[in-house]
Amino acid sequence: MAAAVISCINLKGGVGKTALAVNLAAYCGTLGKKTLLVDLDPQTNASFSCVGVSAWQQHVAQHGSVADLLGARKHTSADGVAKEAHETIFRDVFPNVDLIPSHIDLFTVDLDLAGATSRETRLRRALKDVIEEYEVIICDCPPNLTIPTQNALAVSTHFVVPVSLDFLSAIGVGLLLKRVEEFCNDLEHKLDNIGIVISRVGRPALHRDETEATLRSQFGKSVIKTKITERVAVSKCAQSRTSIFDSGDQTSAQEFSSVCDTLLKNSKVI
Ligand SMILES: Nc1ncnc2c1ncn2[C@@H]1O[C@H](COP(=O)(O)OP(=O)(O)O)[C@@H](O)[C@H]1O
Ligand SMILES: [Mg+2]
């Protein structure tokens, strides 16, 4: 079966995209699914969460990063040849999970590729040489719809939108869904929404309840029932290069398991 490719997107930062992408990848790994996590955010948070800063530094110096696959200026040799996907892979960051790390040079890749053709489909082409190895590929995206996110969407079969419970985030979801739809129409590409995940939920408050009610009435079944609450263990995991499932916080692990389970069912991975 062809790999399910799932992009984790939102135009907002700090809503839990990376936490979900990393833990969804780890969850797939625990199910025995051969999984590839692709970090497309120039802030490289997913890469740091999986392998730490120094291992990341060593790896990208030697083997390259996703910036090579997109053809960021400094990552292409004089004759225009960049690295191939299999060279950039950091193997076994979690059981059954590999990583293609990101690089800060992705910040300017839109300018580097200003005059290039087929800019949105570079990742799709690059992954052709490794896609058969994987059952699931997860793309962690930056908080915008620039070239790295467009490349993620163009290779994806599904997407998930983490959202926090504040008024502005909730408004943003509608705009995002509209832009994704336009992008898919332009590329004649089919992409399924496998869920809106309410994340980083803090203490009960009236404004949060109202925002949740608005989201659920506006987007109906797309909003996943289980919410991910704000727990110290989630940010600790990112520091200690572990997944939430190995953190010892059973409450948080259960929330992530439930959300991941629904997302994988919605994408027919399980
Ligand atoms: N459920 C959570 N509980 C506690 N901290 C979280 C949770 N989800 C994310 N964080 C922390 O909040 C910050 C932003 O989350 P992150 O997943 O990086 O968001 P995004 O990728 O959308 O910018 C990070 O420091 C992360 O460790
Ligand atoms: Mg992130």
Image: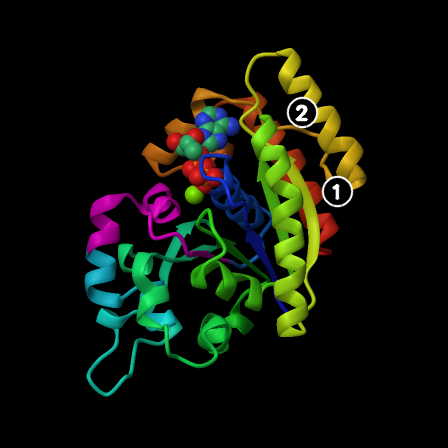
- The answer to which of 122 and 238 lies nearer the viewer is 122
On screen, residue 98 versus residue 104, left or right, reads right
Mark found first going from the N terminus, 2 or 1? 2
Q: Is residue 175 above or below residue 154?
A: above
- The answer to which of 199 and 83 lies nearer the viewer is 199
The span picked out in magenta is 36-57
- Check disc 2 and report its element: helix, strand or loop: helix
- Residue positioned 57% across, 34% down in the render: 169
| x and y percentages locating residue 5 in the rendered image | 59, 61
- Residue positioned 52% across, 48% down in the render: 25
Residue 93 seen in the current view: yes
Q: Nearer the viewer, mark 2 or mark 1?
A: 2
The residue to which callout 2 is attached is 211
* Chosen colour scheme: rainbow
Ligand 2 positioned in quadrant: top left
Residue type at tag 2: Thr
Q: Is residue 69 above or below residue 50?
A: below
| x and y percentages locating residue 19 in the rendered image | 48, 38
* Residue 37 belongs to magenta span: yes
On screen, residue 267 versus residue 16, left or right, reads right
- Residue positioned 44% across, 24% down in the render: 233
The residue to which callout 1 is attached is 222
On screen, residue 189 versus residue 233, left or right, reads right
- The answer to which of 110 and 149 lies nearer the viewer is 110
- The answer to which of 166 and 162 lies nearer the viewer is 166
Say which mark, if any, is on residue 90.
none
Q: Is residue 190 above or below residue 11?
A: below
- Check disc 1 and report its element: helix, strand or loop: helix
